[in-house]
Image (cartoon, rainbow, N blue to C red):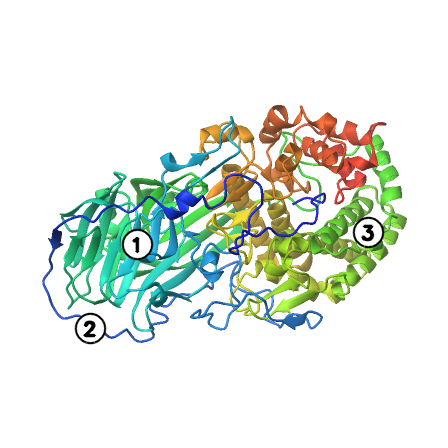
Amino acid sequence: MSYQRPMMPIPSQGDGTYARPAIPPPYIPTAARDGPPPLPPRPGQQRFDFQETPATNKAPANSQNLEMPFSTEAADIFSSAISTDQPLSAFSRTSHPVSLPVNTSTGGKATETNKFYGNMLLGDQTNPVWTHPYSFFLSKDSNLGMAVSYVSASQRVFASGSPPEYFFGPAGIKSFVFGAVDFTSANQVSLGLTNLTHLQAHVQVRKNANQFILVPLVQGMGFATAVYYNMIPKLSSGVGFKSVNGVTSPRSGIQKYQVVLQNNVTWTLYVTVPSGQSLSLALSNNQIIGNKSVNGCIFQLVPDTNSAIDAAAGCYPNSGTLSGSVSGTTGQYTIAYGLSGSSNGGKTLMYACPHHVSSFTTTMASRKINSSLDSVSMGKMTGYITNTFEMQVNVPSNVGFDPYSTISGKSTPKYSSDVLNAIKSAASTEAVADVVNESNVDSMYFGGKVLAKYAWILYCCQYVIKDKALVSTLTNNLKTAMARFISNKQTLPLRYDTTWGGIISSGSESQDFGNSYYNDHHFHYGYHVIAAAILAKVDKENGGNWLSQNKTWVDNLVRDYSNPNSADSYFPVFRSFDWFAGHSWAKGLFASGDGKDEESSSEDVNAAYAIKLWGNVTGNTNLESIGNLELGIMRGSLNSYFLYLDNNTVEPASFIGNKVSGILFENKIDHTTYFGTKLEYIQMIHAIPITSISSFIRSPTFVQQEWDQKLSSIVSGVQDGWRGILMLNRALSTPTEAYAFFSGSSFKTQYLDGGQSKTWSLTYSGAFI
């Protein structure tokens, strides 16, 4: 997002999807949505018979929670909640216009709004969700059930041009559909959702409470898994079956088949029949059909034939638990997967994204197998037989409030007398400006940017030029400006939504970029939190008590977008940050044919930096470590999927010339923005705001490459606030040039973005000349 982004209605495609208008192709291409035409019925039958024994037709006890117990609690830095108190009474209570679907069990907890499975909670619940490398969606046409789609790299669709503006995976291809003979009409098929946390969802494709197909959704799951309860299995395919052949079984009780689809992709199917039951399968009329009802029978599919996968057959992940720690500049985190079923190796099959593989600890090496599958937007995924992902990253524990650079030899700020005089001259004007009225806007986003801008000026006055008079004036004015928000007297007051569990704007869905529908909360609230951290630090060091008086309000905002523990039942755990994807998702309660998306990777960084600084100021070391760990993870993920060095091998080679993603969806990358197509918008939405943490993510090499290939040719023609962003970004690779721009006689105030000050721009660039 940017300060110059105009207010605009959130576009609707008429079916509840949320998409930027007028950008070809549609997010759900019609041909791709419908998939290939069905093949004519295959004559005759091919039978796969097992020993027949009676099957029970009674659902297991507690059928709403079928798997082994799991916990969303985690050790170390995730082990405690920020608070378990009710949200402040200043936030009036409201129910959300988007209600939870029927047959959704929340367990009394707040419900995730920005997670990978969100489409199944929204609209008609038929839009896909991506677990990577698969997508799943409810099919209610002639193939009733849960559809599974796998899109290989060769199937990606690219725009014309070099580099192409976008590429996407054809959506809606039904590689397989987990269905049942018992489903005879679409109105018999519905979804039930249970065990909803930030790392998993259990989806029931229901005929009724006792007859359903359980599809556990966990990101990175190696098998597309379906467990049948009191139903007669039926597998169909929109692609069509070319051949189905039984092959040697991994062990007794598991049947193994190789299934070749009409597109010549070979899948392996494992069927685990519970002890005391039997099942015969027959291929008839392009469907694989069971001969009887089964209870607890596991069907697993993977588009690979590597025999090493046999060791994981019969076992699947049902949950994920996050744990982590930070020591010095090293962060470690583990996603431990709860398992159901059993396998020869005692583990399951998982696929890791490139940023996982690059940060895996040495213990993961022995678990790797020679299997790789493609994701659409996160590159090639690598197979592991494991029940944990164990990762280690470098974290910026050594980066605080002070300007920081990764330019060799320039990590520590140094100011000459000339630079200090220039900063003081700018601050003498900006520090006494009217922050109170400037922040009086109908937007948490815009208001937060203004508050953060003045907070960074306050930092400069306190720690760089050390002007007590300016510090006193700006501290008082900033307190007054923030008091409007803390007392909830801004134009669009915040409310606490009791339906989903979160603090939302009182504006409509088209105001403030959809804040009331949970869009962009980490962007919006991150600015407020970082402003509060700086104000609290300066005020405390000057003998004030602003922190103790206002900590709870700031904590409420942090809890909304980054609650670390499910003991806090008022907010979901990590609404925004996706610990598997390695970054946040900005899209809230809007269905989308291409899944969740994020545009401004740098404002995601700002939100994590805000957590780090707020944890530091308040003495919450766990929170500070969470911010550090998120930043360490994003250094890898953003430089894989959002920011492209010339040697990037993760994204398609033809796309790397764009240098940045633009908007990254789960099923698409589109080199554009939601608010315009000017090149400075697209590139710099991944730079704004430029703060002390920016260089940790945006390396000097990347910044120089982007400047040479994309920006140097357009900068002279940019005459608005994007000019200042372009030039402060230049300080990440060539600070002398950036400082000369902001201190030069030709500099104009119009070159400053609404969230940017000349004082901070001189301070940051001048620290490293």
Name the disc covering residue 56, or none: 2
Q: Quadrant of the N terminus?
A: top right
In the rendered structure, which disc, 1 or 2, sits on the residue that comes first in sequence? Answer: 2
- Asked if residue 674 shows in the view, the reply is yes
Residue 462: x and y, percent?
Answer: 81, 47
Disc 2: CA contacts within 10 A as few (<14), some (14-19) or many (>=20): some
Q: CA distance from mark 1 to mark 2?
A: 24 Å
- Asked if residue 328 shows in the view, the reply is no
Residue occupied by mark 3: 438
Secondary-structure class at tag 3: helix
In the rendered structure, which disc, 3 or 2, sits on the residue that comes first in sequence? Answer: 2
The amino acid type, in three-letter code, at marker 3 is Glu
**In the shown orientation, is residue 501 left or right of residue 49?**
right
The amino acid type, in three-letter code, at marker 1 is Val
Q: CA distance from mark 3 to mark 2?
A: 69 Å
Disc 3: CA contacts within 10 A as few (<14), some (14-19) or many (>=20): some
Secondary-structure class at tag 1: strand
